[in-house]
Amino acid sequence: MDEAARGEGGTPCGASLPCPPRTARIHSLESMGTVDGPGLRFVVFFQGCAYRCLYCHNPDTWAPSGGREITLDDLLGEIRGLAGFIKKRGGVTASGGEPLLQAPFVAEFFRRLRREGFHTALDTTGMVATPEALKVLDHTSLVLMDLKGMGDTLHRRMTGRSEAASMAFADEVRRRNLPVRFRVVLVPGYTDTEENLRRIADFTAGFPAAEPLELLPFHKMGEYKWEALQQPYFLHGVSEPTEAEIARARERLRQG
Ligand code: SF4
């Protein structure tokens, strides 16, 4: 490439740092989502996840090489076509899988979206807390953060991984005072214990910009996917929480 074809910083994209990737691997797209952030949302489900949550209803997002490739320009093009529906009272959500595993792409994706006036939400576990991953927060309007289980023992039991990275990620969200909505899946016998609920209440109280926590009842709608992938499903004998159990947990969280 001759100098004239290069950008200001000497790279093809005009930056002095390495150019962000122009493609990502995605699992799927949802053009009118209503549950992953405020208003009507375009949701990008990124492919790849390093956790193995016991209750995962999308194990088909785990393999980093699965899904399909999409370019940044194609993705932005699809979203621009829906701007009339999602720009004013909705936005764009990066979900997964785990979007932070493709953090440089997501950072550039969000940067471009915000420059065009879109609200951006990052639906994450915070499983990556590298400088690259934290850069996504520079361009994030709202963090939707799953709390898998408080304390390393329960976190490892629920996900197979330590909670250290997600706690570091959460610390950065707190330090920046970013709007954050925590989400907890209520799994009877696992995440609905007195100790876990107390720890969630204590932890989330430390975030002045936190929105009300979302308590999501565990369900088994994804169980068939585990079977299709020939993965052992460990929550087979666990019942979905009753209305009374959900109400009790909600009350416990409210008490702090
Ligand atoms: S973080 Fe999400 S996608 Fe990954 S295993 Fe857990 S529930 Fe599934």
Image (tube, helix red, strand yellow):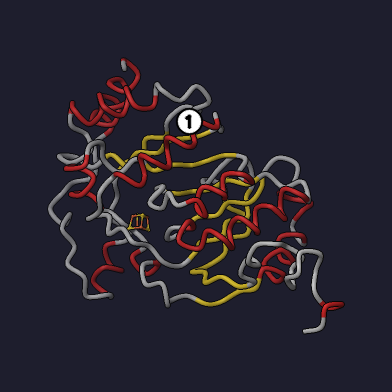
**Nearer to us in this view, 29 or 138:** 138
Left or right of 75, for residue 8: right
Residue 52, percent from left and from top: 27, 59
Q: Split into 4 quadrants, where in the image is the N terminus?
A: bottom right
Q: Split into 4 quadrants, where in the image is the C terminus?
A: top left
Identify the residue at the far top of this view.
255
Above or below, 240 against 246 in this view is below
- For label 1, the SS is helix
Q: Which residue is mark 1?
A: 174
**Image point 48% across, 69% down: which residue?**
27
Q: Residue 19: name its quadrant.
A: bottom right
Above or below, 150 against 1 in this view is above
Residue 31, percent from left and from top: 63, 59
The amino acid on which the numbered mark 1 sits, given as a three-letter code, is: Arg
**Nearer to us in this view, 256 or 55:** 256
Residue 20, percent from left and from top: 63, 65
Ligand 1 image-quadrant field: bottom left
Left or right of 87, for residue 129: left
Above or below, 10 against 55 in this view is below
